[in-house]
Amino acid sequence: MNKVVTFGEIMLRLGAPDYLRLVQSHQLDVSFAGAEANVAVSLSNYGIPTDYITCLPQNLSLIHIWR
């Protein structure tokens, strides 16, 4: 079976739990999204081989989180 390759950016969503406002919460829920990533995950769940290609900026805080 051929592999499906998607190209795109991942979105990191930070949201307060239990429908609180951001300023009311001491913690945040983290979720990842993006149309291309969603397609890759959905196809992978059906057993179709997928790859996801993206590019990350040279951002020190992002590099610190990634490691």
Image (cartoon, helix red, strand yellow):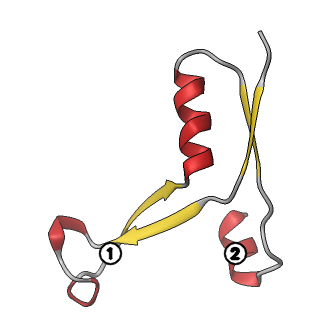
Report the disc number at residue 52.
none
* Residue bearing mark 1: 27
- The percent coordinates of residue 60 (x first, y second) are 76, 83
Quadrant location of residue 21? bottom left
Label 2 residue SS? helix
Q: Earlier in the sequence, mark 2 or mark 1?
A: 1
Instruction: Please state which of residues 7 and 15 is positioned toward the viewer in this rendering.
Output: 7
Quadrant location of residue 51? top right
Instruction: Please state which of residues 52 and 7 is positioned toward the viewer in this rendering.
Output: 7
Residue 34 versus residue 38 in the image, above or below? below
Q: Amino acid at mark 2?
A: Leu
Label 1 residue SS? loop
Quadrant into which the C terminus falls = bottom right
- The percent coordinates of residue 6 (x first, y second) are 73, 41
Please report the residue visible at 53 percent of the width from the left and 42 percent of the height from the top. Answer: 38
Quadrant location of residue 40? top right
In this rendering, would 3 be left or right of 46? right
* Residue bearing mark 2: 62
Q: Amino acid at mark 1?
A: Gln
Quadrant into which the N terminus falls = top right
Residue 28 versus residue 61 in the image, above or below? above
* Disc 1 crowd, CA 10 A, few/some/many (<14, 14-19, 20+): few
Calculate the distance from the C-alpha at mark 2 to the C-alpha at mark 1: 19 Å
- The percent coordinates of residue 43 (x first, y second) are 58, 26
Q: How many marks?
A: 2
Please report the residue visible at 70 percent of the width from the left and 64 percent of the height from the top. Answer: 66
